[in-house]
Amino acid sequence: MARMSTLRNAWGRAAFLLTALLILGLSAGARAESVATVIRIQGEAQASDQSGSRPLAIGDPVQRGDRLTTGIRSRLEIHFRDGMELVLSDGAAMTVSAFEWAPASSAGKAELTLAEGAFLLQTGAVGKLPDHPLTVKTPLASVGVRGTRFWGGPMDAPFNLLLIEGKVVVSTPAGSVDLTESGQGTMISGGGEKPQPPSYWGEERIRRAFATVSFE
């Protein structure tokens, strides 16, 4: 009887360990999906998730759910699986909240969430889909992307956005504006306020915007 009890206990422990390892393996497999790759870094940048943070280097994977941050005088550029490219300024924090891309069926979606800093975004295949499933969210506005390239961040106001090509819709709870021509921009002065009507930015203002995401 004692031998049977010992065997049962051993089998119980083995079954518990096997279940735990299976759960951990499934979680790691789901978490390990890479959605983008680091292609350029200046200074220091990190990616963090619920398990902690890790320094980034050229060639490192970026995963769905990662919060990307950059240090002082730093820049980070990543390339997504659908061809989208993102550049972050120094002192930036942006989360890859969602990203899916199935090239065989031309289906996907993406959502980026900016907490701090400035960014430059060149959309890929997801941003060109007809149902417009790419969104950039910021503390002051949501940007609906229509296959385009644009810059966003603080400058002359808490949030500014410059359209380089394509079309974007900048929305807040108070209203929205469409930017449809290269060189048009808008700004939001504070929480709950409507984006200002589109206006053409001058060369000096555009230069200041690009300087925040330019590599030395």
Image (spheres, helix red, strand yellow):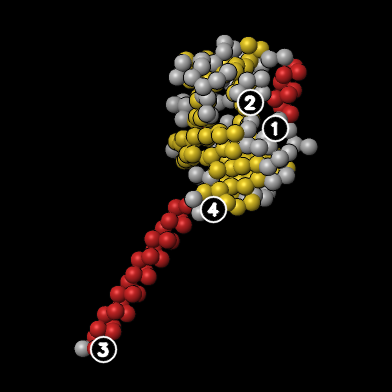
- State how far apart marks 2 and 3 are (Cα): 71 Å
Q: What secondary structure is found at the residue carrying circle 2?
A: loop
Q: Nearer the viewer, mark 2 or mark 1?
A: 2
Q: Position of residue 59 (x, y in %)?
A: 65, 50
Q: What secondary structure is found at the residue carrying circle 3?
A: helix
Near mark 1 (Cα within 10 A), the count class, few <14, some 14-19 or many ≥20, is many
Residue underneath mark 2: 154
Near mark 4 (Cα within 10 A), the count class, few <14, some 14-19 or many ≥20, is few
**Earlier-in-chain disc, 3 versus 4:** 3
- State how far apart marks 2 and 1 are (Cα): 12 Å
Q: Nearer the viewer, mark 4 or mark 1?
A: 4
* Relative vertical location of residue 149 with respect to residue 83 in this rendering, above or below: above
- State how far apart marks 3 and 1 are (Cα): 69 Å
**Earlier-in-chain disc, 2 versus 4:** 4
- State how far apart marks 2 and 4 are (Cα): 28 Å
Q: Residue at x 68, y 49 (%)?
A: 58
Query: Would residue 85 be seen by someone viewing this image from the given angle?
Result: no
Q: Position of residue 46 (x, y in %)?
A: 62, 47
Q: Nearer the viewer, mark 3 or mark 4?
A: 4
Residue underneath mark 1: 213
